[in-house]
Amino acid sequence: MIFEWHSGLWQRVLESAERMPHALLFSGPAGGGKRIFAEAVAARILCLQPGPDGHACGVCEDCLWRLAGNHPDLLRIVPEADQEERTDAPVEKAEGGKAASRQIVIEQIRILQQALTTGGHRGSRRVAIVDPAEAMNLFTANALLKLLEEPTTNVQFLLISSAPKRLLPTIRSRCQTWSFPRPPAETAARWLAERKVPDAASLLAFSGGMPLAAAELAEGGGAAARRRFVDDVASLPAKTPLKLAGEWESWLKNKDSLAGGFDMPTLVGWMQRWVTDLVSLRLGGPVRFFPDRQDVLRGLASRLSVDSALGCYNEITQSRRVAQHPLNARLFLEDMLLRYARNLQAAAPAVRK
């Protein structure tokens, strides 16, 4: 099924069912349900007898295959590192004991190409889901581009992306883009309330208004992690950046963090949101991500000059670009926190009230 905030997009699926473009790009912020929508579209395409509402029946042989996770005409192209989460099957480490790749590699597209050269098992349509599409490197993207330029009959490509600007322009031009905006705030809040998500308001704000991201954060103990993060950042510079860097390194390595997918890019992303709110306050704007900690943020913002605030944001943004693969986690955290603390300590006039 789909979420209520996607009802208009689902109607678009129904209206274009017989003339749907061979490649669709589902684009929008993470945490809004693009993947679930894509799965619903794939289910409808493969179902032998969709219901009156256009959704897959769930009981035909094709639906049973799909629900069991082994439909031969549904081809999912995802990074190796994501496969365990999506299939509940352990993923072996890469050769040499390296961690599973977070990229979609060219070999996956070659396997897809081989699969598409044979006829569908039902002799009808097949669906290839590429998720997230921005995980493709240049070589992978060019290989997929060839498939999009010379589409195989009865193959539906569904590309999912939260960062479409990172895709090759030629990839985007071969797809029809469907935009998935943030749901209305009232709708998102009601959806979380119906599921009794704790700390819903603060987690929804922290997740940029994306309800699925907020719910996922709550399920993974994100509320407690968020509180710790805020307390830690607010302790600077009283607590030295070097000491906090050591604590955060241990935090990232503990088993709960590893099991919950709490990693360096996530932590740096949180830091960027915190600094975004600081900059917004210093420029006279609202608090977006941490409305429940406005008092702390206002106190910190009053110590920043505009130049220091903007410099702090630019430095955190640069840190995020390399957060995926820092050469040394401890040194990376020390550098990020030292830069942040230095900007806070810079002499600046207080903000007039």
Image: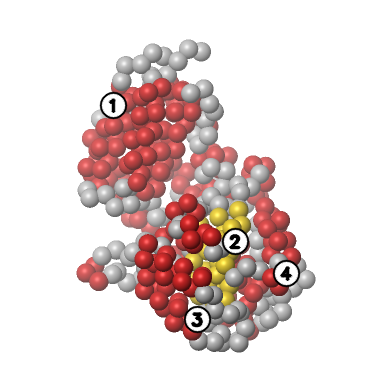
| Nearest to viewer (mark 4 / mark 2) | 2
> Which residue is disc 2 drawn over?
176
- Residue 343 location, x and y as percent? 32, 26
Snapshot quadrant of residue 16: bottom right
* Colour convention: secondary structure
Name the N-terminal-most of marks 3 and 4: 4
According to the image, label 4 marks what residue? 54
Q: Which mark is residue 263?
A: none
Q: Is residue 190 above or below residue 111?
A: above
Residue 246, horizontal then vertical, whole percent: 24, 41
The image quarter in which residue 173 lies: bottom right
- For image coordinates 63% across by 77% down, the residue present is 46
Spatial CA span between label 3 and label 1: 56 Å
Task: Indicate which disc, 4 or 2, sits on the residue closer to the N terminus.
Answer: 4
Q: Which mark is residue 342?
A: 1
Mark toward the viewer: 3 or 1: 3
Q: Residues within 10 Å of mark 4 (few under 14, many from 20)?
A: some
| Vertical placement of residue 352 versus 116, above or below | above
Percent across and percent down for residue 32 are 57, 52
